[in-house]
Amino acid sequence: MPAARRLGPVEITLIVIDVILIGVLIVLLATAPDGPDDGAGGPTTTTSAPSDPATDETTSGTSTQAVTAPADALDVAEFATPSGNIWCTIGDSAAVCQIDVIDYQPPQIEGCADNELAGKIVQVSAEGAEYPCPTENIPGAAAADRTVLDYDQTTAVGDYMCASSETGVTCTNLSAGHRFTITRYGPSLD
């Protein structure tokens, strides 16, 4: 049987370098961010939405935003779409929208039978988007008395952003990235 060949200094050095590089790669992969999440399906800027520093965690350094509002976002908490079919209220703990005329079968909401508003109101909070079981219209002024958020405009108040389009409204929780889109053809919850 032939004698085993010993590794030379160059070969040992190369093995040590390989081990170090593999270790560095593992550390980089373990500490790398998950990647961008714009939450709105389009480009965003790095400018934060107007907010109240006393209540907005993003300005205190204790939290980072999953989504950022565009720099030209308005600061309107109660608005309606130009058609008047959708109206929304952005509050401290949620953004909620209501729709009048729909072309979809409203979803069944547990414990919310025989409620004509069920499935016509959707909300998003830091915990996620959902259909609440409404007992009345959403808070705020009547739809006709609200500021009109023109199509392709965005409003950002506190930790929430809503964007109006010809097809509907998308509202997003900026910290968590949860969102919903409501249209006359049906909402989607993310």
Image: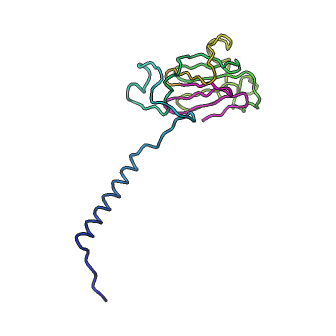
The quadrant of the image that shows the C terminus is top right
Q: What is the x, y in percent for residue 183?
A: 69, 28
Whether the magenta-drawn stretch holds residue 65 is answered as no
Q: Residue at x 68, y 26 (%)?
A: 166
Span colored in magenta: 161-190
Q: Residue at x 77, y 29 (%)?
A: 103
Q: Is residue 157 left or right of residue 15?
A: right
Q: What is the x, y in percent for residue 157?
A: 51, 20
Whether the magenta-drawn stretch holds residue 177 is answered as yes
The quadrant of the image that shows the N terminus is bottom left
Q: What is the x, y in percent for residue 156?
A: 52, 22
Q: Residue at x 57, y 36 (%)?
A: 41
Q: Residue at x 56, y 29 (%)?
A: 172
Q: Is residue 141 above or below residue 99?
A: above
User: Residue 17 sits in which quadrant?
Assistant: bottom left
Q: What is the x, y in percent for residue 133?
A: 67, 25
Q: Is residue 178 above or below residue 30?
A: above
User: Residue 115 sits in which quadrant?
Assistant: top right
